Amino acid sequence: MPPIAILLTVLGLVPFIACGLAALGQNADPADRMLGALIDYAAVVLAFSGGIYWSLSLLPTQPVPALETRWRLLFGVVPPLLGWAALVASSWLAPWIGLLVLIGGYVVTVVMERQTGQHSVLPAQYIWLRWGFTIIAVAMLTTVLTLRLLGQTVVF
């Protein structure tokens, strides 16, 4: 795994942590705006993670059965759809529903990637990197969800 990929992955966690902590602040208006920013960013990143399946399907590295190609393309659409569902749920219903959809979306996506990795399509280092990213992202989303549902704030 190139070091730049690791660095960029770690940098990709900064908005999760910054927005997540700010969404737990005592001042309700800025905290609500940062919660929206967290949900928006998490949805965009989740959608981005579906691209790996399209690239696996479109790269001519090895012959792949047509059925497997179709499944990969289908898996590539799942994360963006879940991200979109989270955005709609948080806008039309409640932000906590959007957070739940995002948490589920990240878990589903990393499990799908693990299954793909078990079939030797993805490098093991990539799978470990994605698991690390997902654990931290889901931990932050879950923390924000739990504390906001309990009405708790964080003092900085």
Image (spheres, rainbow, N blue to C red):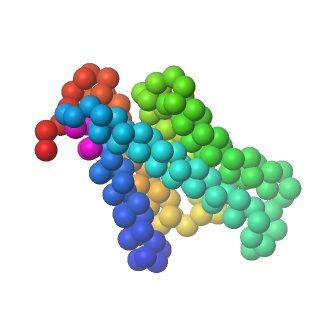
Picture residue at 36% right of the left edge, 54% below the top: 15
Q: In this picture, is 149 found above or below 61?
A: above
Picture residue at 47% right of the left edge, 66% below the top: 125
Quadrant containing the C terminus in the rendered view? top left
Q: Position of residue 80 (x, y in %)?
A: 62, 46
Residue 50, visible in the rendered structure: yes
Marks counted in the figure total 0
Residue 23 within the magenta-colored segment of the rendering: yes
Residue 60 within the magenta-colored segment of the rendering: no
- Answer left or right for 97 relative to 117: left
Picture residue at 42% right of the left edge, 64% below the top: 9
Return the residue nearer the eye: 13 or 18: 18
Q: In this picture, is 104 found above or below 126?
A: above
Residue 114, visible in the rendered structure: no
Q: Position of residue 130 (x, y in %)?
A: 47, 57
Return the residue nearer the eye: 52 or 80: 80
- Answer left or right for 121 relative to 38: right
Q: Position of residue 42 (x, y in %)?
A: 46, 46
Q: Which residues are magenta?
A: 21-25
Image quarter of residue 20: top left
- The overriding secondary structure of the stretch rendered in magenta is loop
Q: Position of residue 86 (x, y in %)?
A: 54, 35
Return the residue nearer the eye: 48 or 132: 48
Of all residues shown, which one is farthest toward the right?
A: 66
Of all residues shown, which one is farthest toward the front?
A: 29
Picture residue at 63% right of the left edge, 60% below the top: 52
